[in-house]
Amino acid sequence: SIDNDVQQERCLSAVPESASRLSPGLRACVLLANPQIRYFEDCYSAQLPSSFAAAIRRVPIHDTTFGTCGQAVFKGEAVACESIATDARWAQAWRWHCLEHGIQACHSEPVGGRSGQTIASLMLCFEEPRLINAWERDVAKFASAVASVAIEHERRDRALREGEARFHRLADVMSVRLDEQRAVISDYQRADQVARSASERKDEFLAILVHELRNPLAGLASAANTLEKTE
């Protein structure tokens, strides 16, 4: 629902914001993979503009080296890029996109789920070419763990809501079918009653017929007996 989507956005946007507070001058974002881990369904950040997230949505996740976050999710391991401008491992479109938003270097930390799969990536963005330092590495691991809890909690709640909705739909269908079965039973009972009434009228008719036939038959029998005596 809209309310739950807003809650997820607030929660996941707070994760990179907290990372930035722990390391002033650092910008960060959380790239969330879709449940099937095929592409990034959204990007959450309190520091990066919406234009950055817009270009990330629907970016596929596979072994092709498009960007550091895709590799972090696909391989399930941290991926660093000391200089985006000169590192030719990554797709040019991704490099230009980062540079346009003032990202000169980055570190992508995988966010693991309960099943063991990587479900997202935390991206730390640097304003100058460099590698991550020890403190920032600890910040990345901490923020990654927090993001994992937030994502799993939201998906568990979503699964519960969807399960409840399916149950209500099934209950509605079963209610309709029960009503249909009751209608069939009612029709059968009415038909049975009609058949019973017809059978009773038939028995009554036969009883009357037998009674009416007995009188003329009795007279014929008496006449026949009289003829036999005369002869």
Image (cartoon, rainbow, N blue to C red):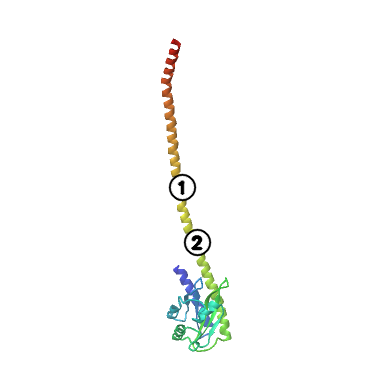
Q: Quadrant of residue 57?
A: bottom left
Type of the residue with mark 1: Arg
The residue drawn where x is 45% and y is 43% is 188
Which disc is residue 164 wearing? 2
Q: Is residue 47 above or below residue 179?
A: below
Q: Is residue 116 above or below residue 202?
A: below
Give the left or right position of residue 100, taking residue 124 as reference: left
Which disc is residue 39 wearing? none
Per the image, label 2 sits on a secondary structure element best described as helix
User: Which residue extends farthest top?
Assistant: 230
Q: Nearer the viewer, residue 78 or 221?
A: 221
Q: Nearer the viewer, mark 2 or mark 1?
A: 1
Quadrant in which the N terminus is drawn: bottom left
> Could you tell me residue 207's position as x and y percent?
44, 27
Which disc is residue 182 wearing? 1
Type of the residue with mark 2: Glu
> Could you tell me residue 105's position as x and y percent?
50, 86
Looking at the image, is mark 2 or mark 1 earlier in the sequence?
A: 2
Q: Is residue 227 above or below residue 194?
A: above
Q: Residues within 10 Å of mark 2 (few under 14, many from 20)?
A: few
Q: Residues within 10 Å of mark 1 (few under 14, many from 20)?
A: few
User: Which residue extends farthest front?
Assistant: 231
The residue drawn where x is 42% and y is 38% is 194
The total of numbered circles placed on residues is 2
Per the image, label 1 sits on a secondary structure element best described as helix
Quadrant in which the C terminus is drawn: top left
Q: Is residue 176 above or below residue 115?
A: above
Real-space Cα separation, disc 2 to disc 1, in angstroms = 26 Å
The residue drawn where x is 42% and y is 15% is 223
> Could you tell me residue 140's position as x and y percent?
55, 81
